[in-house]
Amino acid sequence: MFDNTIPLLGVLALVALAGLLTLRPLRRAVLTRSIFSAYRKVLPQMSDTERDALEAGTVWWEGELFQGKPDWRKLHAYPVPTLTAEEQSFLDKECEEACRLVDDWKVTHELYDLPHEAWRYIKDKGFLGMIIPKKYGGLEFSAYAHSQVVTKLSTRSSALSVSVMVPNSLGPAELLLHYGTEEQKNHYLPRLAKGIEVPAFALTSPWAGSDAASIPDSGVVCKGIYQGKEVLGMRVSWDKRYITLAPVCTVFGLAFHLYDPDGLLGDKKHIGITCALVPYDHPGVDTGRRHFPLNAMFMNGPTRGKEVFMPLDFIIGGPAMAGQGWRMLMECLAAGRSISLPSSNTGMAQMTARAVGGYARVRSQFKMAVGKFEGVEEALTRIGAYTYMMDAVRKMTAGAVDLGEKPSVVSAIAKYHVTERARVVVNDGMDVIGGKGICLGPSNFLGRAYQQIPVAITVEGANILTRSLIIFGQGAIRCHPYLLPEMRAAQNPDVRQGLVDFDRALFGHIGFTVKNGWRAFRQGLTGSHFVTVNTDVAPEMKRYYQQLTRFSAAFAFLSDVSLLVLGGSVKRREKLSARLGDILAQMYLISCTLKRYEAEGRKKEDAPLAHWAIWDAMYKAQQAFDGVIANFPVRFIAAVVNRLIFPWGHPYVVPSDEVGHQVAKALIAPSATRDRLTAECYLPLQENEPVGAIELALKATLEAEQIEAKIRAAEKDGRFDGNPQANVRDIAIVAFEAGVINAAEYEVMKRRNHLRDIVVRVDDFPFDYGVATANKPADDRMAA
Ligand SMILES: Cc1cc2nc3c(=O)[nH]c(=O)nc-3n(C[C@H](O)[C@H](O)[C@H](O)COP(=O)(O)OP(=O)(O)OC[C@H]3O[C@@H](n4cnc5c(N)ncnc54)[C@H](O)[C@@H]3O)c2cc1C
């Protein structure tokens, strides 16, 4: 009797509970009220700056990934960004010319700056005003065109690309466009568009880097004399460092806390962070000194001022915008972050893929092109596949900006993951080219890129912070359908309304979590084979859509469980938060890659690049799941979640060597795939240009390969035995003299050898080159 009664009672209790839960007033009174008051107590107080940062921007594709059921139709319906004829022409002519005017070795070693003619050219041609509308004399380029320009310039010189990138990123022009008064816009924008004004933006201080809202720089509202008249203004003191273009700027945005102790503007004593536009020659302003950010030679330096009086009209947007500086910065951050570093770092990767791939075919050791050794292939594979994925990410993210999005989470993902992949790509490139990358000089094409990588990692949100605090921290709150409504309800001063809203959000949330948990389990049990992909996709990619759908449900479920168990402390548990962010980020990178593959017409020849990159990212996402589960503080829950998400164990292993081989092969020979992968690369086909020489040498190497095989066969047969000239450098002439190859073939070999020798050459200098005069040795080494 007991056996039957207990389940029956259980079922009845569940039915009763379910019935109770559908009666909202009763549910609120019995259950929600106590949860609501407990939640209000534990909800951490948020500062205004935190709230501005969290609420800034819009949610885009990452919202789909966060909610456990991505709608693939949406992904493929996003328009593929394209260039107008004018933008394309700018890329083909003006960008090519700007690249031609810059010799990176001269810039970084001799001039310590861009050459004058390059500065003149980029100013005159409007490079500094790409985001400024035409009515102000700017180029009014799309975000995508802007990204294309930065990508291309970065394949040539970081000083060039940064000098163009910064005026078009978060700074005076962008802030004026959104918040400036008509007078400010009419004065500054035409001048910025033509480079008559060079802008900088000064936020960072020695005491406040990542925690930029804590800058000690301050201004006090007071009266003072400006242009001979007494006006209401501010006395501002600041000490800023690392400010790009500061040494050469003519006007800079300055962020500081504004105080009004005498109540001259109202009753608020601490008005808040304020952004002003300050001319470099305003009395008391100190700019002009520079730092040397890892020999990049773009201008960067400090600016200081002590009790500098400036009128309130200097505030961007005028006095009405005093105190709105942080909100302004947070609102504008996403656009620049979506474009600048993802583009510049993709440019670096494209150049690496092109030049290192070519070099690996031209350079032989052990009588074989080094790019054909399996060990080198591994590095080439990462270079190729990551470059493909990085390019996909920067294009799709710039496309989001063109759709009117301010994608705060996605831009953080793009910034972090593209720069981290660039680090891998350039490092791998350095390994492949060996000493050639190490000895600096005019023929080194990669050493400066290698030096530059840490700059990208540090700026626009240092990477560790971006990964640990922003991607999931902001992503969870912004993308989750119920979290923000719950928080807003709990903070509602109208407690009754707050309870009603909280109840609705809470039960929506519970349903959401349960559904995602069930979906993740079901899809895990069936290996996601029965997941329907709701749009037409390339058959060879279909499994990724299915697996990603499964991972999305699992991620949504794991996020909710983590938030439930860790609550507000998830912010401090950075390692867990970072790994959760990694899962979201890898899913975004994969989405971009799938989108690229479709957008480019499902090119079968490019499929290995997409396969390897996606496979690797799926594996990394799986590792991130593991990292969260293995370190979850409540072990019982971790075990249950693990069983639910991975009922049969792990679906992914490392990407296959065979696919990797196909990727590496695509890099070491000319092909349409290689051209698409490196489409923005500046390629001057001249022997005195290091990257151009590799292109020429690659072609010559391929033309000579059959002839070389003939020579090797003759060598194996002992035809050149005992001839000291039959060495790696001179064997062609021996073969010619021995009649193994004819005159025409010898010419091909000679040309190959000539270009090969240029490519493998490194620079050398007099032994006292660059030594300070005071430290010069005596004339004769022996006499020293
Ligand atoms: C070349 C260059 C150009 C720049 N250009 C400009 C510019 O034009 N204008 C401007 O205003 N600023 C500029 N900056 C400043 C740049 O934005 C800051 O360097 C950056 O914000 C980091 O500050 P920091 O270097 O002081 O590092 P810190 O803030 O001291 O950080 C040190 C480390 O701690 C990590 N970290 C900090 N807080 C956390 C956290 N809560 N969780 C996890 N990790 C954390 C960071 O990720 C970093 O790895 C530039 C910097 C450089 C180097």
Image (cartoon, grey):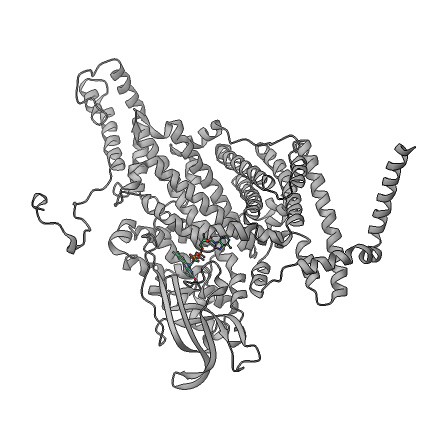
Q: Residue furthest right?
A: 1
**Observer-nearest of 399 and 622:** 622
Q: Count every numbered label the image shows and give the total.
A: 0
Q: Residue at x 46, y 49 (%)?
A: 342
Vertical arrangement, residue 745 with respect to residue 441, above or below:
above
Q: Residue at x 68, y 63 (%)?
A: 491
Residue 227 drawn at (x, y percent): 38, 83
Identify the image quadrant of residue 514: top right
Q: Is residue 246 left or right of residue 776?
A: right
**Observer-nearest of 133 and 557:** 557
Q: Quadrant of ligand 1?
A: bottom left
Residue 296 drawn at (x, y percent): 33, 53
Residue 175 drawn at (x, y percent): 49, 66
Q: Is residue 747 visible?
A: yes
Q: Residue furthest top?
A: 717
Q: Residue furthest bottom?
A: 229
Residue 570 drawn at (x, y percent): 60, 51
Q: Is residue 60 left or right of residue 7?
A: left
Identify the image quadrant of residue 113: bottom left
**Observer-nearest of 699 and 556:** 556
Quadrant of the drawing holding the N terminus: top right
